Amino acid sequence: MGKKNTLNSGEQLYSNAPLQNAELSSAGEKGSAPAPDNNRRKKKKSGKPNIFVRIGRFFKEMFSELKKVSWPDAKKVFTQLGVVLLVVVIFLVIITAFDLGAAALLELLVTNASQ
């Protein structure tokens, strides 16, 4: 292993590089001020392109991905459309029958209760 150094808090610090002019005191001690940051006022460039470039790239990638999709043929689409419409009609009939039955039952209860 490398050179063994001790921090002020008693923790062991292991390093392969020699320490020269290093401050090993903890940052939370009283009286120690943080080092002034002279580069703080410089504007950091984020590296991201502007919004219009990103929107253009989004649409370009979207159309590229849509070209890779395996689209079904017309026969398969119409077959699946027929199945969906058939299921909707079946549920429409079932729900309408329950609704008419509940309305008839409610009317029967109201007419018998008033007599």
Image (cartoon, rainbow, N blue to C red):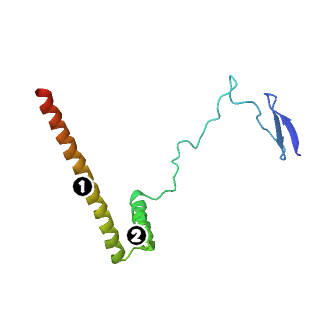
Say above or below: 84 vs 73. Answer: above
Q: How far apart are labels 2 and 1 at the CA level? A: 41 Å
Q: Are marks 2 and 1 in contact (CB under 8 Å)?
A: no
Relative to 109, 53 lies left or right: right
The C terminus: image quadrant = top left
Residue shown at 76% from the left, 34% from the top? 23
Q: Amino acid at mark 1?
A: Val
Relative to 18, 105 lies left or right: left
* Secondary element at tag 2: helix
Most foreground residue, 24 or 93: 93
**Rendered image: mark on residue 93:** 1
| View extreme (top): residue | 30
* Secondary element at tag 1: helix
Q: Amino acid at mark 2?
A: Phe
First in sequence: mark 2 vs mark 1? 2
Residue 12 position, x and y percent, is: 83, 35
Relative to 51, 46 lies left or right: right
Q: Which residue is mark 2?
A: 63
